[in-house]
Image (cartoon, rainbow, N blue to C red):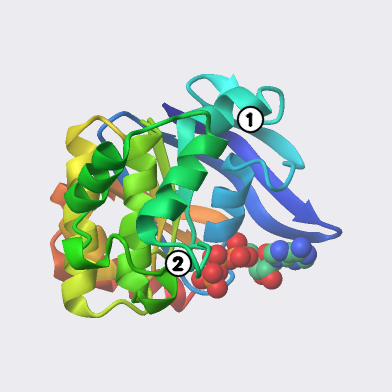
């Protein structure tokens, strides 16, 4: 569903991403780990076509994101670290607005159901987003991904700053998207969630994907050791 082939991003003489090869299939949750500056956001931004590759290719559903910009955007949903919503609109009004931008129209009841399925407390559905916690805003993001029937979910540190309960709820939502066959690529610093929720884990260091494995194949202790080993290189 999502593929990087020799994907490379250079800024002048500096290589932010160096020859990345990875594949994320439907139902996979691929977690990218790595220290600050390792190239995680660069990878996500290349799939979003926010930036152009210097070499190589990023494809979504076999379509090159630089050639099929509109088509690939329609297949994906993106949740950044801080999801931008209109603070003076309610969660439901935001969802309605962003669905409309994507050409989707839902009844009020359907929008309410989508928000409830995403774990937003019913009391908050009609309240202004300015009163929402970060975890609640991320739930609106998941509701939007579900409403858009996205086949690909791109997440850039979506749980940073969430308390353990909210982070756990977010993981549950990712697992429910996985059950629907969504292919997820997530940049994260959370080793525990990567092991717990991810199906695949990649460790990046200075623009290079230095390790790639299925999360079931390593214990949490081994993951931590591997991660620290690469951070000290
Ligand atoms: N526009 C740019 N011009 C020059 N260098 C850039 C630019 N954007 C990113 N970089 C550099 O590319 C490298 C990779 O950055 P990136 O944001 O992908 O890291 P990251 O793994 O997401 O880190 P973090 O965990 O801090 O979010 C960093 O050294 C960063 O400074």
> In which of the image's four quarters is ligand 1 placed?
bottom right
Q: Residue at x 40, y 34 (%)?
A: 148
Give percent across and percent down for residue 36: 53, 74
Front residue of this view, candidates 33 and 61 = 61
Q: Which residue is mark 2?
A: 34
Residue assigned mark 1? 65
Residue 106 sits above or below residue 195 on the image = above
Rendering coords of residue 64 (x, y %): 63, 24
Q: Is mark 2 within 8 Å of ligand 1?
A: yes
Mark 1–mark 2 distance (CA, rounded to whole Å): 24 Å
Quadrant position of the N terminus in the picture: top left
Foreground residue among 207 and 129: 129
Question: Residue visible at 41% across and 35% down?
Answer: 152
Q: Which residue is rendered at x = 18% and y = 57% of the image?
A: 119
Indicate the position of residue 52 as horizontal and vertical percent values. 74, 42
Q: Specify whether 220 is left or right of 206.
A: left
Is label 1 within 8 A of ligand 1 (CB to nearest ligand atom)? Answer: no
């Amino acid at each position: 569903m999502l593929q990087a082939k020799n994907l490379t991003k250079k800024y002048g003489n500096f290589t932010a991403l160096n020859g990345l090869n990875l594949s994320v299939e439907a139902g996979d949750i691929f977690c990218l780990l790595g220290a600050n500056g390792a190239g995680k956001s660069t990878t996500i931004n290349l799939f979003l076509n926010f930036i152009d590759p210097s070499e190589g290719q990023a494809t979504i559903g076999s379509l090159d994101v630089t050639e099929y910009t509109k088509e690939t955007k329609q297949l994906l949903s993106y949740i950044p670290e801080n999801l931008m919503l209109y603070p003076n609109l309610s969660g439901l009004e935001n969802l309605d607005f962003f669905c409309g931008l994507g050409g989707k129209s839902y009844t009020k009841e359907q929008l309410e159901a989508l928000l409830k399925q995403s774990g937003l407390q019913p009391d908050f559905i009609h309240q202004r987003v300015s009163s929402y916690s970060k975890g609640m805003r991320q739930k609106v993001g998941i509701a939007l991904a579900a409403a858009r029937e996205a086949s690909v979910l791109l997440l850039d540190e979506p749980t940073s700053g969430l308390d353990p309960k909210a982070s756990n709820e977010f993981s549950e939502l990712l697992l429910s998207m996985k059950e629907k066959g969504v292919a997820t690529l997530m940049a994260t610093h959370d080793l525990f969630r990567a092991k717990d929720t991810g199906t695949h884990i990649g460790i990046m260091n200075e623009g290079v994907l230095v390790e790639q494995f299925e999360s079931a194949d390593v214990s949490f202790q081994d993951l931590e050791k591997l991660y620290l080993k690469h951070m000290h290189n």
